[in-house]
Image (cartoon, rainbow, N blue to C red):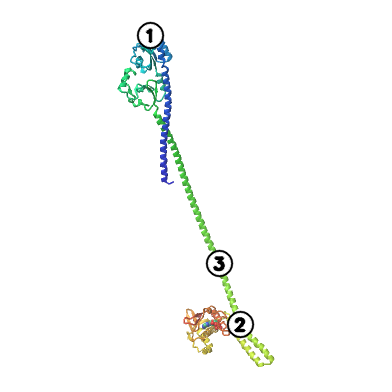
Amino acid sequence: MNSYKRQIAMLLLATLAVVSIFATYLFSSYQARKDLRQSGERQLQMIALDLEAVLERHETLPYTLSYLPQVAQVLAHPESQDGIRALNLDLQAIQQQAKIAAIYLMDAQGNTIAASNWDQPQSYIGQNFSFRPYFQDVMQRRSGAGHFYAIGNTTNIPGYFISQPVFASPGLRGSSEPIGVLAVKISLHEFEKAWRSSEDPIALSDRHGVVFLSNREVWQYRSLRPLDAEVQRDIQATLQYSGKTIHAISALSKKEQNGYGEYLTRPIGRLGWQLMLFPDEAKVNTAGLESAAIVLLLLVVLATIAAAWDQRQQRLQERLAAQQALQQAAAQLEQRIAQRTRDLTQANADWEAQFCKLQQAEQVLRSTQNEMVQTGKLAMLGQMAAGITHELNQPLTAIRAFADNADVYLQRGKLEQVSANLHHISSASERMGIIIAQLKGFARKSSEQLQAVNVTQSVHAAIALLQNDLHRLGLQLELHLPESLLVLGDNIRLEQVIVNLLRNAMDAVEQQPRIWIEIRVSEQVGQVWIQISDSGAGLPDAVIAHLFEPFFTTKPSGQGLGLGLAISSSIVQAMNGTLQAENRSAGGACFTVRLPLLNAAS
Ligand code: ADP
């Protein structure tokens, strides 16, 4: 993954993390709020049921009491101290039995004439409660029963008051004026105590929104919202809250307001009361934050693990890449070494093959050379044998024929014929003799004694030998001969060479329109050259190739043996010289004998 994609992925993950943390916070807050509400509602319901039960439990008590005959009697005879005392004791007993705050009886003017707390320092007896709504409502028959909550005027203890009118006799209820009012006071103080155990604020407010019971003491006798002047006045008039001015809770200090805010509520009783529970909103926030923190922690742990894993993975990948690179390098190296080795082996093999070929070639060459030497010799021997056979066979056949004929002639007595035949036999054998003599010259060994030979003299001697033939041809030789040049050799044999060459030249020019032969002897850097040139037809390539082979001739049978140049060449070689032939540019052939010059000193 490249870094750009990585960054985008990180950004997305980070966004996702933030969103999930926030979502967790929201969800968990929502859940906590729901839970809080549910538990709040439950708590509220329980408190409300308790409260309602207490209020209802004593609802009928004043009604029942108003029917007591001694009640009407006391009202009828307020001067009777005994009757009052007896009633006081009765009321006290009932109050204690019913576990309520007080039971008391007022006359039609609101003066208390009997009370359960008759023996208490803060006894109601003698107190006038005509200003209280629960008295007025009942006396003026606005309602069957009176209900009121107030701080006790005498005791300063708050309580719930329930009142019933008292009639002179029970039969008069509904038709005549009440003669007094019987009231019970129920303390709600116990609730306040019970609520203290609750963490959340609980409050009970009257229909004006004035809190009169709460586990938050400072909220007591304070209103949920500021009260208008009329309501304030009303409250003052009934001394409901001991004449206190009621301030709003919102006027309290922040610390004192703590917990005040949204609340759950339920209506309670007959006086438009409201029971309120203030769920601790901070709990909601705390729960949300806690969950978010857990998720955050989880994400951090996850991110740490992921980062560690990623790093490990990266390191692994790096190690793998390095390993691969190393392996690749090693493989390349191995490959290169193998290639080099192959190349070297190949080169070596090539060399060996070439060497082998060279050796083979050498061997082939050597054997070819041997073969060539051998075949050359054999060929020459064959040629010689054929030539000799051919040359000797003719005269031999002739001799046999003449001899046979002579025999026949002899038997017939023709002696002349016999003599003629014998003559033929003689000339035929003479010819055989010439051939054999020529062969003898060829066969002579080269290791004979050599001596200083004057080349010019040899040339003159040769010309002298051929004088007749030269005359016959009418040929004037062109001679270029120096005074004297010496070579080491055999003068007879050198003459023979020159005679051979001159005779060939004469044969070559014989049929030519221009007859010209030149003999030139010259000294050339330590050599003596004898050149014999003619105006003949020259030497065709086919002839040059076999020129010095024995018995090679272009001449008709009987005129040439083909031994001249072969013999001449071997004579010159025996004198450490060479014999070569070439065509002259002007036409005709030129034969050159090269011999080492014998200097004067030697
Ligand atoms: P022969 O003369 O008996 O033929 P040679 O060995 O002397 O034997 O000569 C061989 C051949 O060389 C001749 O037959 C001829 O064809 C050729 N030859 C020799 N000399 C000459 C020359 N001067 N000009 C042309 N051809 C020549």
Between 37 and 133, the residue placed more toward the observer is: 133
Judged by depth in the image, the label closer to the viewer, 1 or 2, is 1
Residue linked to disc 1: 74
User: Of all residues shown, which one is farthest toward the left?
Assistant: 229
Judged by depth in the image, the label closer to the viewer, 3 or 1, is 1
Q: Residues within 10 Å of mark 3 (few under 14, many from 20)?
A: few
* Residue 542 visible from this viewpoint: yes
Ligand 1 image position (quadrant)? bottom right
Label 3 and label 1: CA atoms lie apart by 167 Å
* Mark 1 and mark 2 residues within 8 Å of each other at the beta carbon: no
Q: Provide residue 142's location: percent of width, then percent of height.
A: 35, 17
Q: Which amino acid type corresponds to the residue marked 3 in the rendered image?
A: Gln
* Mark 3 and mark 1 residues within 8 Å of each other at the beta carbon: no
Residue 499 as seen in the image, left or right of residue 60: right
Residue linked to disc 3: 359
Q: Which mark is residue 390?
A: 2
Q: Residues within 10 Å of mark 1 (few under 14, many from 20)?
A: many
Between 503 and 277, the residue placed more toward the observer is: 277
Residue occupying the point 50% across, 55% down? 335
Q: Which amino acid type corresponds to the residue marked 1 in the rendered image?
A: Val
